[in-house]
């Protein structure tokens, strides 16, 4: 009898496969408060984070987190349905609803969990989900959790979506990122809204990266929309949110397993996000957004988001370019399959209002020096 490999042996085989494919990944230590810090001990400026407005290191955001820590302790300690809300959860939900012009909002532990929650509750085996081909992995996983039939439409191709919707029967849900996380381009949200209202499809928009827009779609007769986002990018914290009509939120509270069976966001994360949201909605936030817009325009004029891809194609070329930039003190990640399609490996530059002019000068000079500018 041949003996079955142990799980450790099986894992080794898998690891060998990953090594052989040249796609080994390992996190590195970045010791930093803000965009400048030490990567494995080497000083660098990071163009890798999604802290688009620099709020993760903002003094009043950090102070709000410390105050929450002192008042409510380090953890939420259980699911909200079990242990109850902390007042800051409700305050943040109320302000997110106002920010997104929605009846209600609710928090999830992460943006990833928010997509799982929405797409599992509003999906199902009697629902067809129409999903943009470049949607984020959490949307893809949410569709799987919902056991929906999934129809993928060509990237930002409204005519394709229209023809697929017209051929479908039954309940329909259209889901799209507002800003696509690896290309930094934006969806035509008004066009999506128009198509959805015409076909009676529910529109789910993931606004995780929509710091420079697009704003939510124009209100339209018959349009039903659920907006999803994260506290972890422009708000500099951790957690996810959903903004939707009251009944949809009540249904999520009662049915969304990624809400029910997990611990609520920590008081410190929640209070930090609340402080960050208040900044974003005031004059300081406006100035930060304007600053970010001007930085983006220095690198790629008119580009709709702070995510700037430099597509190089080959995985090794992208890895080499990222290594060369790092040796100049510039941290820009190489993004490879399976995160992006084969043959489209790239550098992904993420800009932040926290980058000062000299940092942007150095980025531009480094890209030019390596023939990447
Ligand atoms: C488009 C999009 N949606 C959702 C998420 C998940 O958000 P979070 O990091 O809060 O889980 C991300 C981020 O990674 C994202 O890029």
Image: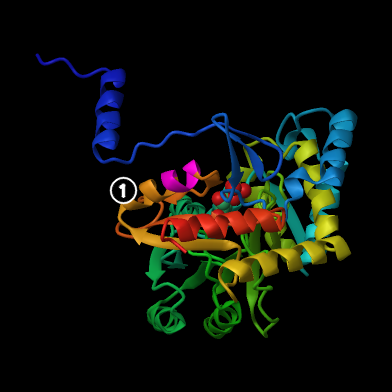
Question: 44 or 108, which lies in front?
Answer: 44
Q: Name the residue at 56% across, 61% down.
A: 307
Q: Residue at x 62, y 67 (%)?
A: 296
For the question of whether residue 113 can be seen, the reply is no
Query: In the structure shown, which secondary structural element does the residue marked by tag 1 occupy?
Result: helix
State the residue position of label 1. Answer: 316
Q: Is residue 373 magenta?
A: no
On screen, residue 196 versus residue 277, left or right, reads left
- Does residue 160 lie above or below 356 as drawn? below
Magenta residues, start to end: 323-327
Can you tell which quarter of the image residue 44 is in? top right
Tell me where residue 223 sits by quadrant.
Answer: bottom right
In the rendered image, residue 326 lying in the magenta stretch gets the answer yes
Q: Position of residue 190 (x, y in %)?
A: 61, 81
> Residue placed at 51% from the left, 33% from the top?
28
Q: Quadrant of residue 221?
A: bottom right
- Relative placement, left or right, of 368 versus 358 is left
Q: Nearer the viewer, residue 133 or 163?
A: 133
Q: Residue at x 61, y 60 (%)?
A: 209
- Residue that sits furthest to the left in the current view: 1
Does residue 28 appear in the picture of this structure? yes
Of the 4 image quadrants, the one containing the N terminus is: top left
Crowding near pointer 1: few (<14 within 10 Å), some, many (20+)? Answer: some
Q: Position of residue 57 (x, y in %)?
A: 76, 44
Q: Position of residue 66 (x, y in %)?
A: 85, 34
Q: Would you place residue 5 above or below residue 292 in this image?
A: above
Residue 295 versus residue 113 in the image, above or below: below
What type of secondary structure mainly makes up the magenta span? helix
Count of numbered circles on the image: 1
Q: Position of residue 36 (x, y in %)?
A: 66, 42
Of residue 204 and residue 319, the one placed in the foreground of this image is: 319
């Amino acid at each position: 009898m041949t003996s079955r490999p142990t799980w450790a042996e099986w894992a080794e085989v898998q690891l060998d496969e990953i090594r052989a494919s040249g796609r080994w990944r390992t996190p590195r230590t970045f010791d930093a408060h803000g965009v400048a810090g030490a990567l494995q001990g080497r000083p660098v400026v990071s163009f890798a984070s999604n802290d688009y407005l620099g709020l993760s290191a903002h003094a009043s955001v950090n102070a709000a987190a410390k105050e929450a820590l002192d008042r409510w302790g380090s953890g939420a300690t259980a699911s909200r349905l079990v242990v109850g809300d902390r007042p800051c959860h409700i305050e943040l939900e109320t302000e997110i609803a106002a920010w997104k012009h929605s009846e209600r909002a609710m928090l999830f532990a992460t943006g990833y969990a928010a997509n799982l929650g929405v797409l599992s509750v509003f999906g199902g085996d009697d629902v067809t989900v129409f999903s943009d081909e470049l949607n984020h992995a959490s949307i893809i996983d949410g569709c799987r959790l919902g056991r929906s039939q999934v129809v993928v439409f060509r990237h930002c191709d409204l005519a394709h979506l229209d023809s697929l919707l017209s051929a479908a029967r039954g309940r329909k849900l259209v889901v799209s990122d507002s800003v696509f996380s690896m290309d930094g381009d934006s969806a035509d949200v008004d066009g999506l809204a128009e198509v959805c209202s015409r076909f009676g499809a529910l529109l789910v928009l993931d606004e995780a990266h929509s710091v420079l827009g697009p704003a939510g779609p124009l209100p339209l007769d018959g349009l039903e929309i659920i907006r999803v986002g994260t506290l972890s990018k422009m708000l500099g914290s951790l957690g996810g949110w959903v903004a939707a009509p009251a009944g949809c939120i009540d249904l999520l509270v009662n049915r969304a397993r990624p809400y029910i069976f997990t611990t609520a966001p920590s008081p410190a994360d929640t209070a930090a996000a609340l402080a960050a949201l208040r900044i974003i909605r005031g004059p300081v936030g406006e100035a930060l957004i304007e600053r970010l817009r001007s930085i983006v325009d220095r690198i790629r004029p008119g580009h709709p988001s702070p995510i700037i891809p430099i597509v190089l194609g080959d995985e090794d070329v992208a890895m080499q370019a990222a290594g060369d930039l790092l040796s100049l003190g510039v941290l820009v990640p190489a993004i490879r399959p399976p995160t992006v399609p084969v043959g489209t490996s790239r550098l992904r530059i993420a800009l932040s209002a926290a980058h000062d002019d000299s940092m942007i000068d150095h980025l531009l000079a480094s890209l030019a020096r390596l023939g990447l500018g």
